[in-house]
Structures are given as C-alpha cells and as structure tokens.
Image: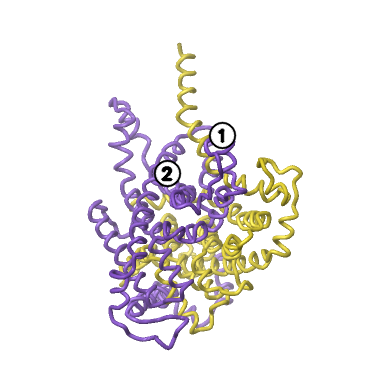
Amino acid sequence: MTMQIKTQRTLQKSFLIYFPLFIATIWTLFPLYWTLVTSLKTSGQILSKPVTFLPFPATFEHYVKAWNIGGFSRYFLNSMFVSSISMIFTVAFATMAGYAMARYRFRGKRIFLLLLLCTQFIPTAMLIIPLFMIYNKLSLINTPWSLVITYTTFHIPFNALLMSTFIKGIPYSLEEAAKVDGCSGSQAFLHVLLPVLLPGIAAIAAYSFISSWNEYLYALMFTTSSRHYTLPIGLSMMIGEYSINYGQLTAGSIIALLPAILLFMYVQKYMVSGLSAGSVKG
Amino acid sequence: MKFTTQKNCQTIERAMKNQTNRILVNKKALPYLLIAPTVFLFLWLLVYPLGNVFYLSFQNRLLSRPKLDGFIGMSNFVKLFTADPVFWEALVNSGKWVITEVLLQLVFGLLTALILKKKFRGCGIFRAVLFLPWALSGVLVSMLWSMMYFENVGVINAIFQRLGILSHPIAWTGNTNTAFWSVVIAELWRGIPFFTIMLLASLQSIPEELYEACRVDGGGVASSFRHITFPYIKDTLVLTTLLRVVWEFNSVDLILNLTGGGPIHKTTTLSVYLANTARRDGDFGYGSAIAVISFFILLIFAILYLKLSKYDQEDEGV
C-alpha cells in the first residue's frame, strides 16, 4: 500500500517537476549549444547540407582568427577596461550611498530615495541624444570614459538600494562595539563592517560588471571608430556585414559570453537570497 | 585586548589622518558627503539631460546640416502626429511588443519559479541553467537566435524541413509575417529568467507554516495559491511587471540586431524609431520629440498602473 503511494508520488513529482524542467532546460540550452557547435565546425561544415549537430572534426581556427584578425582581442580589452573601471566606481559610490541610507537619518533622505527609484523609470533611449552632446562638448566621444561615466551613473541606483538593504541586515551593534574599543567611524567601517559585507559587495560588483559588459545602445552611440568598439558593438557590426563569417561570429560570441557566464555562475546563488532578504519589509 | 585594538586603530588612524578625515568625523556632514558623488552624477547625467531633451524637442537639430539649427516651436510634434505614418505604426508596435512580451514572460517566469521553489534533487543546477539567459547581452542573444533563424544555415529551417513541416526554407527575420514573432521569441528567451529570479526570491520569503495550515484546513493547490501565494507576492508582481514594461518599452538592442526595425517597419517600436532617428539619421531635434512622447507615455502608464494596482509603496520598497 505505502509502496504504491510512494511510486505514485514519484510519478507525480516527475511529471510536475522534472518534465517541465526538462523542456525548459532544452529551450534554454539549445541556442547556446548551437552557437558553440557552429563555432567548432570548419567553414565547410557550417554551410554543408544536411546540417550536422556535432562538430566533427572539431577545430579552433575560428577562435584564433576571431581573436587575431577579427578584432576581438581589441574589443575584449576595451570591454574589460570599461566594465572593470565602471564596476569599481559603481561599487564605491553605491556602498557609500547605501551606507548613508542604512545608517543615517538626514534631511533630504526621502527625496534622495525617491530619486533613486525614479531613475529606474527613465527611458534609456531617451538620453542618448543629450548625453552624446555633453560628451561631444567634452571630447569624450570615442574614448572609454564616456562609457565608464555613463555606466557608473546608471548602475548606482539599483546597487545602492541593494547595498542599503545588505547593510541594514547587519546589526549596528557591531560597529558600536568597535567604536567603544576606540576605533573611529571609518575604521569601524573598514575593519568590522566591510568583512561581513564582502559577499554583498561581490554580488553588486558582479552585477554591475555584467551590466556594463553587455550594454549596447550607449556604446553604439558613443563609439564610432572600430578602435574603441566594445564586444557587443563588434559583434553587432559583424552581424550587419553583407557576407557574414559565421565561424568567426560564433567564436566571437563564445568569447564574449564566457566572462559573463562565469561571473554569473558565481553570483547567482547570492542573487535570489539577497533579493528575498531585501524584499522582507521593515 | 582593548589596548591592542586601540593601538591598531591608532596606527591606522595616523596613516589615514588628513584634512578630509577630519571633515568626515563631523556627524552632520557625513551622510551628505557619502551621497555627494551619486547626487553629482545624477544631476549632471540624468536630470540635466532630461531637461535638455525637452528643450531640444522644440529645436531643429540635424547633425548633417548644422546651419539650419534653431527654435522651431511645435513643428517636430506637429510633424510626428500629422505627417508621420511610421510614428503611428511604431506606437502600435510598441504596444503589441510590450504586452506580448510582459504577459508571456510573466506567465512562464511564474510557472518556472513555482517549480523551482520546491526542494528536489538537482534544483541548484536547474536554477543555474535556467537563470543563464539573464546574464547575456541583447546583442549576444540576437546572435544566438540569428544562427537559428538564418535562411540558409539556420537550424530551425533544417529541423522543420526534416520533420516535413516546411517545404522550403523561410527567412524568419526578413519575412513580414514571421519577423515580429521571431523577435518576440528571442526576447522571451532572454526575459523569462528575470521574472523567475524576482518571483522566486519573493516566493521564498513566504513562511512554510502558512501552507501547512492551509493543508490542515483542507485547502487545495488552487486555494493556497489564491489565499497565500498571491497576496504575498503581489507587491513583487506589481513592481516587476512595471519595471519590465518600462524595460521592454525601452529595449532596442535585440530588435536592432535581429531585424533593424524592418521589414518595412514591421518591428519598429518607438524606441527603435528613436534610436534609428538619432544614430542613423542624426536628426536630434526630431529624435528628442519622439523621446518626449515616450517619456510621457511611460509616465502616464506608471502612474495609472500604480494607482490601479493599489501598490502600497513604502519608503524603502525596492
């Protein structure tokens, strides 16, 4: 009897959980799989009919060519530079603002909070024209700095809000104890709060890095010479070409998505728990 | 113990001592100093440009013909509303795009979140895999899907032909009948994880006891969803949907790269039209007018939506 119920439960479980998840997994992985496979095929195999689903024999020549000839080494370095620098600024400013919101009462706090929330609703496409004109006046078009400043500004609000919920989750008594022991406010922050806060900081760092790494519209607007292209622009220009080099395009894509995926794998565990901690009202 | 900490702190303090440190000690000024860089960036790169767009929308501003620059009153708006069929088409496309995307993403995202919330073997791996598209850029996603949509090398045509569904290959993103839905599906692929992540986070904050109490009272799956799950995740639902509407309304990267807004404006949304007007045509005045219209559409929508959904906003709700 109990056996029967048990098998029934397992059956039910596999139908309600594993079957939909199986479909969802295929739906999610197939496009990635197809690009990976294509990047490993020879040029002849890519175009041959009927299509093959395994790269055999596999080749890395597209990766070598995309990196050396296709310009992807430059795009990669540009992306790396822009994303890292804006990540550092975003983390610093978001932590500062988050700390101020979590630990202090001050005049204008509500307005500041409202401003942070409002920024989420500003149409990004709307600002490409005035920002272009600002950067043009300062001769920042076709430099990485226009992107660094833009990304930092746009990534602060969400990360600052997240940071302030992280900091609120850490009891103030920790810092107080350090102050009783004679530490100044900044020391209490550096030696007591910061170590506890590190996972949260890692999460927003990764989040802001991925967002900058992936950004397209501003990079398209503010860089016009291929010397300054970031990866998304480099890829996009390649898709737009008249005769597409599929091998290099797919290899370039894999190069572009690897850092984002690796970072994502690292932070995705924090993300859900961080968000559910933040969603608890209080 | 106390002594050593103090000594450590003193050495560090000496190392860090300078003018700014003394100001930082001032309790009153500290929070303002902490938010100063953020406020400065906001004023410079968000508030000022936002005002600038309104100013520009009343101007003639063409990159190719700077001699004609100048104030032209409402001309841009008059042209938009009375003499520009693409604008109206883009408006309809924007509505169609946002509604299909957000609805489908919400439904599939919620279903996935409800499944992933359960504890079962391998749920960590499934989560990591199903969240994955969230981390990819719009350009990459359009690349991945182009590789499947292409007329000659695309895998979808190959599979459909082998299954006998299609007799000849279709240019999915170039055909007026299929272009819109091809882009919708690719965007869906990227968009579902956002809802899954946000809703899963919210679902996890529901105390498990509530469900047990419901089960004891003889409530089924449907009633426990209606009376426990839904009220708990309502605020998250409202907020994520709103954020997503704004986000989809603004999203251009995928459409620009998959179809460029074509064929014959079939996939031109308002934001794509704006991006094309600004970047391809270099018409900043007209582009700004489109931006102003977009801004008001979103503003009105956001206000109505929050009013209608009775979203109880707390000062710290994220």
Q: Position of residue A50 (x, y in %)?
A: 66, 40
Residue under label 2: B109
Tag 1 subunit: B
Q: How is the image coloured?
A: by chain
Look at label 1 and name its amino acid: Leu
Q: Tell me if I can see residue A118 in this picture.
A: yes
Q: Residue furthest bottom?
A: B67
Residue under label 1: B163
Secondary element at tag 1: loop
Q: Position of residue A26 (x, y in %)?
A: 55, 39
In the rendering, what colour is chain B? purple
Q: Quadrant of the C terminus of chain B?
A: bottom left
Query: Residue at (34%, 65%) from the top-left corner?
Result: B85
Considering depth in this image, is A98 or B292 the residue closer to the camera?
B292
Q: Position of residue A122 (x, y in %)?
A: 37, 66
Chain identifier of the yellow chain: A
Marked residue nearer the N-terminal end (2 or 1):
2
